């Protein structure tokens, strides 16, 4: 997993609530057996018409907006457990998703894929949308070690929470599998203590 | 100290605490399928790790298999390659595969319970969010992503933070024509599509306890649709009667030992939950969804809300626009062209019986295409043994072969753009049943009546 420390970027605003993983990556694109290439079909049905032509009104087709931060309404990533949703965002160049809350499985999948789910309050989210609306080029600084989101142009600064273990993993590029494999002796010892046979 | 059912099971599976307040949690059963497992097998290979406990894994092909002519090779090349990859991985790593052609193939959340692999007090995971289904047996069961699938393959464990606990009690008795599906659609409509995010839900109360195992599975299945990590119900005699004698259920002395343990699996009387909700079963009527998330549900004979909070208005109206509905509108009388009865939510024998009991001697409306996709080969065989196939065929319903089918439309079973489908599945997201498809979630009974009438009706007028 790639290391994540600090990111300077503009943000792409998607002010809708309950964006589900079927929108992020529709099921018909889940037939690939590798992790790469899903970015091409990120938000496919919002981004393209059935004939494949782009829908100009969708934010990812608007040249005014770009950046590695996606700014989205509450309950981002609800629905299916497909990690392909996190891979698609990552593959399309996003490194941070900001929302006022995330669906549990998506949050875990993002953290396991090097994508930072950055949770702010409802009021902070509204402020962030307003900043991007005023100026699409607004730069944000995401500082993971400090757990801050900073807007140099306006001086806005927000603190965000993240699980201490997951923070270390992202900063160092570690994932859970490394840790769990290192704990195999304890896992085998636990198996010996179980009294039931089923 | 009083402990919840959830905590009793969780605590029994903690290998040891881990840094950052997490627990290493042991997983008893790992269910895998063709869509979310290939990258996990690749991960093992890339890291040169063995599969730690192959006997604890059950594999099936369900998500993108065709529901016609399953004896023939899969025509669609990408689907075929994904299913072939699962077959090859299972052979290589020694995993038992209930693939196409197997007498017990089916939707992963249907066959686990059928096989007796789903047992009270166990921890169960699968790279599928509807793993919560297995909570019906008093198991801690939840969906995981592919990175976690690889973790369980490598270590039979996950690194998890303990979720908060919520109890949802539904007291009293359900009214005639009101089913487990209506109960859970009602609860989700009350709490909202994100209303249980961060929680593990225990369902309790007389209306829940009165449900069959099939009904309990329908309820627990949709826990994720209000954001819950999972949902579970304390095991009781209904549970034990269902499990007993199944292929992988404990036998003889082990059965007695198991039941004695399972009797300890309930939330202690003084348990304090992080959140509690109580509902009256008598207030629940047949339900239907009108929007593009499962929280957008209402009484079948109700009206789409006129007023919504300002912060939700943009998403709400976008949703109604997609569905072709208006605020304040009633859905009664809407013409429907497709009816889909299937999915891990409602594809079990009881669901098929409910449909057959209603449609016996009737005929579906001419403009409706009605397909029934059984959850497993076992359900299919049982339906045939009971003569349900003939009743359904005579009524113009097409009984297919098992799979996830038009619930997520990964195979060729798709609803055309713009068309309305009353579906017994679990998600009405935009494009869920095919690009542009419009899904209205409902119970098998509502779906059957809709197919016969060809439009949305107040079913209380039409009950047999």
Image (spheres, coloured by chain):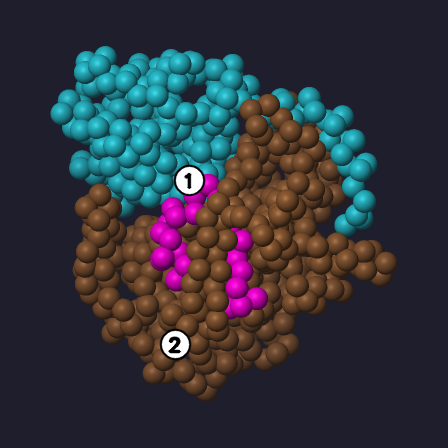
Chain colours: A cyan, B brown
The answer to which image quadrant residue B259 occupies is bottom right
Q: Is residue B205 magenta?
A: yes
Residue B161 located left or right of residue B275: right
Q: Which mark is residue B449?
A: 2
Which range is magenta? B185-209
Q: Circle 1 — which element?
A: loop
Q: Looking at the image, which residue is at 33% across and 43% down? A: A18
State the quadrant of the N terminus of chain B. Answer: top right
Query: Is residue B434 in sight in this rendering?
Result: no
x and y, in percent, of residue B236 in the image: 66, 63
Mark 2 touching mark 1, by CB under 8 A?
A: no
Magenta-drawn stretch contains B213: no
The residue under label 1 is A103
Label 2: which secondary element: helix
Question: Residue B120: horizontal and vertical position, in percent?
Answer: 67, 54
Tell me which residue sits at (70%, 33%) in the image: B15
Q: Which of B207 and A25 lies nearest the eye of the viewer?
A: B207
What residue lies at 64% left-to-right and 76% top-to-bottom? B385
Image check: A111 left or right of A193?
A: left
Disc 2 residue crowd, few under 14, some 14–19, many 20+, Cα 10 Å: many
Say yes or no: labels 2 and 1 on the same chain: no
| Image x and y of residue B168, in percent | 48, 56
Q: Which label belongs to residue B297?
A: none
Q: Chain of mark 1?
A: A
**Numbered disc 2: what chain?**
B
Q: Check the image and report above or below for B53 versus B107.
A: above
Nearer the observer: mark 2 or 1; the answer is 1
On screen, residue A184 above or below A43? above
- Residue A195 located left or right of residue B235: right
């Amino acid at each position: 997993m790639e290391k994540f420390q600090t990111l300077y970027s503009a943000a792409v605003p998607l002010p809708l609530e309950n964006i589900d993983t079927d929108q992020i990556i529709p099921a018909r694109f889940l037939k690939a057996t590798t992790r790469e290439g899903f970015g091409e079909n990120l938000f496919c049905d919002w981004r393209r018409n059935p004939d494949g032509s782009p829908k100009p009104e969708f934010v990812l087709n608007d040249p005014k907006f770009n950046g590695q931060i996606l700014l989205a309404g509450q309950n981002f990533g609800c629905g299916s457990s497909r990690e392909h949703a996190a891979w698609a965002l990552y593959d399309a160049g996003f490194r941070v998703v900001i929302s006022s809350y995330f669906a549990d499985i998506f949050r875990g999948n993002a953290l396991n894929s090097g994508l930072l789910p950055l949770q702010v309050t409802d009021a902070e989210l509204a402020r962030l949308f307003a900043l991007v609306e005023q100026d699409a080029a607004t730069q944000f600084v995401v500082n993971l070690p400090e757990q801050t989101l900073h807007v140099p142009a306006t001086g806005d600064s927000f603190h965000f929470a993240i699980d201490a273990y997951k923070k270390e993993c992202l900063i160092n590029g570690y994932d859970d599998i490394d840790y769990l494999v290192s704990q195999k002796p304890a896992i085998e010892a636990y198996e010996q203590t179980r009294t039931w046979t089923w | 100290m009083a402990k919840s059912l959830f905590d009793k099971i969780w605590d029994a599976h903690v290998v040891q605490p881990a840094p950052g307040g997490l627990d290493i949690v042991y997983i008893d059963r790992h269910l895998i399928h063709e869509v979310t497992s290939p990258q996990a097998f690749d991960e093992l290979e890339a890291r040169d790790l063995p599969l730690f406990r192959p006997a604890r894994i059950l594999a099936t092909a369900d998500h993108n298999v065709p529901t016609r002519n399953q004896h023939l090779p899969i025509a669609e090349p990408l689907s075929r390659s994904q299913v072939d990859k699962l077959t090859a991985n299972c052979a290589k790593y020694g995993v038992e595969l209930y693939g196409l052609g197997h007498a017990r193939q089916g939707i992963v959340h249907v066959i686990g319970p059928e096989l007796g692999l789903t047992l009270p007090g166990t921890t169960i995971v699968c790279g599928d969010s509807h793993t919560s289904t297995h909570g019906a047996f008093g198991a801690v069961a939840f969906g995981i992503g592919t990175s976690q699938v690889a973790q369980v393959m490598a270590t039979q464990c996950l690194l998890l933070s303990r979720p908060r606990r919520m109890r949802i009690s539904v007291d009293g008795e359900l009214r005639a024509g009101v089913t487990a599906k209506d109960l859970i659609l009602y609860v989700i409509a009350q709490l909202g599509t994100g209303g249980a995010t961060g929680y593990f839900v225990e369902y309790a109360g007389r209306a829940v306890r009165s449900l069959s195992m099939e009904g309990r599975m329908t309820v627990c299945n949709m826990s994720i649709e209000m954001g819950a990590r999972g949902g579970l119900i304390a095991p009781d005699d209904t549970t034990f009667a269902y499990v007993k004698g199944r292929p992988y259920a404990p036998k003889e002395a082990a059965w007695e030992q198991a039941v004695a343990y399972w009797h300890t699996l309930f939330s202690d009387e003084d348990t304090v939950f992080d959140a509690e909700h109580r509902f009256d079963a008598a207030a629940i009527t047949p339900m239907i969804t009108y929007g593009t998330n499962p929280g957008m549900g209402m009484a079948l004979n109700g009206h789409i809300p006129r007023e919504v909070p300002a912060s939700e208005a943009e998403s709400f109206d976008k949703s109604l626009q997609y569905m072709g509905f208006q605020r304040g509108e009633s859905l009664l009388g809407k013409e429907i062209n497709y009816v889909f009865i299937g999915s891990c939510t409602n594809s079990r024998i009881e669901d098929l019986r409910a449909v057959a009991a209603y449609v016996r001697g009737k005929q579906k409306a001419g403009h409706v295409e009605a397909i029934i996709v059984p959850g497993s080969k076992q359900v299919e065989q049982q339906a045939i043994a009971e003569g349900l196939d003939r009743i359904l065929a005579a009524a113009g319903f097409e009984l297919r072969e098992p799979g996830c089918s038009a619930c997520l439309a990964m195979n060729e079973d798709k609803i055309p753009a713009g068309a309305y489908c009353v579906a017994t599945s679990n998600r009405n997201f935009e494009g869920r049943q095919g690009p542009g498809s419009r899904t209205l979630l409902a119970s098998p009974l509502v779906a059957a009546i809709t197919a016969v009438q060809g439009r949305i009706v107040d079913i209380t007028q039409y009950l047999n």
